[in-house]
Amino acid sequence: MSVRAVRSKLPGEFVDELYRAFPISEADRILRGFARRRYVTLRANTLKATVDEVLSELKRAGVKCQRVPWYSDALVIQNKREQYIESLELYVQGKVYLQSLSSMIPPLVLAPQPGETVLDIAAAPGSKTTQMAALMQNRGRIVAAEIDRMRAERLMFNLERQGVTIAEVFTRDGVIVADEFPESFDRVLVDAPCSGEGLFIASQPATYNHWSRRMCKRCAVSQRRLFDAAARALKPGGAMVYSTCTLNPDENELMVESFLKRWDHEFEVLPMKLQVQGWAPALEQVKGRIVMPEIRHTRRVFPSQLMEGFYVALLAKKG
């Protein structure tokens, strides 16, 4: 599908804003990323099986897969769709978790350690919560907040299936949960509800028909609330990741910049050690204005056949 064909399918206002925010070459690259269906990707759940065991079971089931250079637990499925993977016993037993590669990045950047206390302030359906539990080897504590009851039930189901024993689910607004534990967490994940522009697939209208400028503004209000609450819950010296699956600078670079201004000199943006194939630098200029120099440490992932569009920032609380 050509760039022109993709443009004709997506909301016109979204396309206009895309070309205002990005150089033409990058906007075209983003639209080409929307043109093709993405590969199925999954994560081996090391709480229940080794990667080699997962590879062996997938091979016996006729599944061809490829390893991911920057994350040893991640696999790209080359010849099957989600429904087939979900029919396999290793999926039912929780030995794998279907998860986009981009979604795996925030927990890796946050890098929670065994024995630490972690807040996942908007946790459902649990892909990143379960990944963090695996990174922590089921040692420590994760507080997982989810305001929607049905999504919280799905979160609890996934935690149980994946063998997670260190996570406690709070079916409440993440802001309220965070304020119950002031300066209590070593690390906080703010994987914020967003407009989801990085997930668009041109051939699947359900991925973008919901989009509106009004929805983007509502998301920004929620993101600010969660971001500030996470900051209050983080211990001095602790680390926090802010991430979205959208392309909109208002929800990404400008959101981090406004946070830094509100929390004057209390937080710093850190460079990320993780080296991801396809990393893109943050926008240095938005709406004709140069953003704060610290924003250069944040990163984008452009949508492609392999990756969803994503934005990730790593911050530390001074003290």
Image (cartoon, helix red, strand yellow):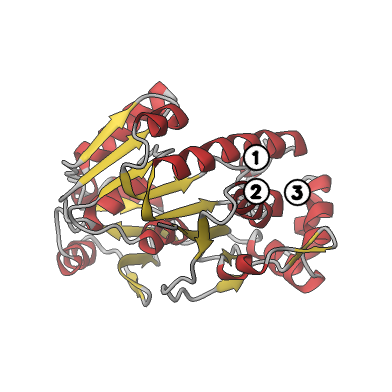
Kindly check if marks 2 and 3 are in contact, taking CB atoms under 8 A apart as contact: no
Disc 3 from disc 1: Cα separation: 21 Å
> Label 3 crowding class (10 Å Cα cut-off): few <14, some 14-19, many 20+?
many
Return the residue nearer the eye: 304 or 235: 235
Residue found at x 79% / y 70%? 23
197 left or right of 270 in image:
right
Circle 3: element type = loop
| Label located before the other in sequence (1 or 2) | 1
Which quadrant of the figure has residue 222? Answer: top right
Residue found at x 56% / y 66%? 299
Q: Amino acid at mark 2?
A: Glu
Can you tell which of label 2 and label 3 is closer to the viewer? 2
Q: Amino acid at mark 1?
A: Ala
Quadrant, the N terminus: bottom right
Q: Which residue is mark 1?
A: 220
Can you tell which of label 3 and label 1 is closer to the viewer? 1
Q: Which residue is mark 3?
A: 10
Kindly check if marks 1 and 2 are in contact, taking CB atoms under 8 A apart as contact: yes
Residue 263 locus on image (x, y percent): 57, 48
Disc 1 from disc 2: Cα separation: 6 Å
Residue found at x 32% / y 69%? 64
Residue 305 locus on image (x, y percent): 55, 65
